[in-house]
Image: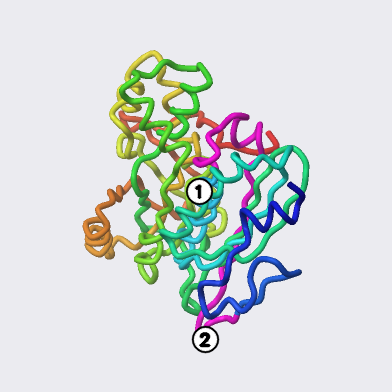
Amino acid sequence: MNEFELIGRHFARAPRHGDVKLGVGDDAAIVAPAPGVEYAVSVDMLVEGRHFAAGTNPENLGHKALAVNLSDMAAMGAVPRFALLAGALPVADDAWLSAFMRGFDALAERYDVELIGGDTTRGPRNLCVTVIGEVPAGQAITRAGAAAGDTIYVSGRVGDAALGLASRGGRIRIDDAMIGELLQRLERPEPRVALGIALRGIASAALDVSDGIVGDLAHILDASHVGAVVDVAGMPASDVLRDLLGGPQRELALACLLAGGDDYELCFTAPAATRRQIDAIAQSLGLPITAIGAITQTPGLVVRDERGDPMRELPRAFDHFR
């Protein structure tokens, strides 16, 4: 199977939406922008050996390759619309590509995202997705709006994906009854698109938790020129992770909770007066949203342990070049 046969079999499809004038198969896609909206554009790579292990289930990988970009759209309050997919593949493996695209297409269909182009080449396995989303003009949520007195929130739970990865790597032993759920959080994250849209006009700043709370929240603090106080006791964690915090594996558990990454939950700030609105959003979406701290005027991030004492050292968030 040559490159163009591969594209025709796995990626080509007729445009589904009227605003896509030309999709996969030409030198570029042509999209007609809708009036009154701005585009949010995000790109992410997943590299074998860095972001996922060789032998990872390709269907799960197809899901995650798109999900991490949809999560960026969620953080901006944008509706994801179009995707471009580029991949370097060691061989033209028909079965692997079919499974990968099943995962990708299933998630794309759920969010009505249309694949409009991309590229393929031969090389070490590397998947790169670009997503284009739409947000009403002037309503995008950025990292730069947090203000002193704002409450800091996080959706869902954090730390599960990192704990699943630690178990898979042999750094900790997790009960068989729990490992499946942890690996599901690692391999098939759920982008919080509906939450991001609901937070327009409410959240003062937001981002998705891809590299760990302490590292990602620091981006909001830097962009907004503020500080924060966060409490470990208030962090939303699974029972298995919470139990580990009280035992000999506390250091690893703290690293998963505060700096593990791969959660793809939303961390956002909002004025204290919006608490009822946020509670109503959580109830309508069936999604826990937990207050974990507050924005302060004094720069820097302070994390308090379960006794309320500031932690002297914090686990370091993920960094590609560390």
Magenta run includes residue 187: no
Q: Is residue 196 above or below residue 28?
A: above
Give the mark nearer the N terminus: 2 vs 1.
2
Tag shown at residue 146: none
**Category of crowding for the residue at label 2, using alpha-carbon neighbours closer than 10 angstroms: few (below 14), some (14–19), many (at least 20):** few
**Category of crowding for the residue at label 1, using alpha-carbon neighbours closer than 10 angstroms: few (below 14), some (14–19), many (at least 20):** some
Q: Position of residue 97 (x, y in %)?
A: 61, 44
- Disc 1 marks a residue whose amino acid type is Arg
Q: How many numbered callouts?
A: 2
| Front position in the image: 107 or 76 | 107
Q: Position of residue 23 (x, y in %)?
A: 63, 70
Q: Position of residue 174 (x, y in %)?
A: 38, 19
The residue singled out by tag 1 in the image is 102
Task: Give the residues drawn in magenta, as a range.
Answer: 32-61
Whole-number angstrom distance, CA of label 2 to CA of label 1:
33 Å
| Image quarter (top left, top right, bottom left or bottom right) of the C terminus | top right
Would you say residue 290 is visible in this rendering?
yes
Residue at the extreme top of the image, as rendered: 248
| Front position in the image: 301 or 121 | 121
Q: Residue at x 71, y 42 (%)?
A: 92
Q: Residue at x 24, y 53 (%)?
A: 286
| Front position in the image: 133 or 14 | 14
Give left or right: position of 132 versus 246: right
The residue singled out by tag 2 in the image is 35
- Disc 2 marks a residue whose amino acid type is Pro
Q: Position of residue 178 (x, y in %)?
A: 33, 25
Residue at the extreme bottom of the image, as rendered: 35
Q: Helix, strand, or loop for circle 2? A: loop
Q: Is residue 197 above or below residue 72?
A: below
